[in-house]
Image: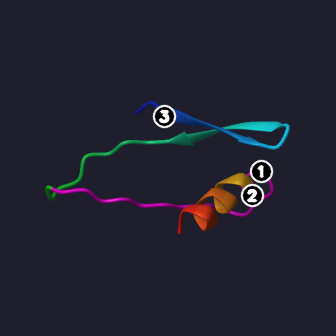
Amino acid sequence: MQPHYLDVQFGERHAAIPYYEINGRHPGPHIFLSGGMRGGEINGIAVNVNLA
């Protein structure tokens, strides 16, 4: 499975956030957002907070 990348810019900083598209068992739109905290994943958490 190959990731897609979401290009985002925070001021002068640029980040490419990987994401995966997965087909579920049931029809209809679903979304799962996840962000980890280990140092480099702080951008993923910030994106999830802004989307929520």
- How many residues crowd around disc 3 within 10 Å: few (fewer than 14), some, or many (20 or more)? few
Residue assigned mark 2: 42
Which amino acid is tagged 1? Gly
Rendered-image quadrant of the N terminus: top left
Extent of the magenta region? 28-42
Coloration mode = rainbow
Judging from the image, what secondary structure is the residue with disc 2 in? helix
From the viewer's perspective, tell me whether residue 39 is left or right of residue 8: right
- How many residues crowd around disc 1 within 10 Å: few (fewer than 14), some, or many (20 or more)? few
Judging from the image, what secondary structure is the residue with disc 1 in? loop
- The disc at residue 51 is none
Which amino acid is tagged 2? Ile
Residue assigned mark 1: 40
Kindly check if marks 1 and 2 are in contact, taking CB atoms under 8 A apart as contact. yes
Prevailing SS of the magenta stretch = loop
Viewer-side residue, 52 vs 44: 52
- Which residue corresponds to the image point at 62% horizontal and 63% vertical from the top-left? 50
Cα separation, mark 1 vs mark 2, equals 6 Å
Cα separation, mark 2 vs mark 3, equals 19 Å
Viewer-side residue, 52 vs 36: 52
Q: How many marks?
A: 3
Q: Position of residue 25 (x, y in %)?
A: 17, 56
Cα separation, mark 1 vs mark 3, equals 17 Å
From the viewer's perspective, tell me whether residue 30 is left or right of residue 52: left
What is the residue that sits farthest to the right in this orientation?
12
- Which residue corresponds to the image point at 56% horizontal and 40% vertical from the top-left? 18
Residue assigned mark 3: 3
Kindly check if marks 2 and 3 are in contact, taking CB atoms under 8 A apart as contact. no
- Which residue corresponds to the image point at 23% horizontal and 53% vertical from the top-left? 24
Which amino acid is tagged 3? Pro
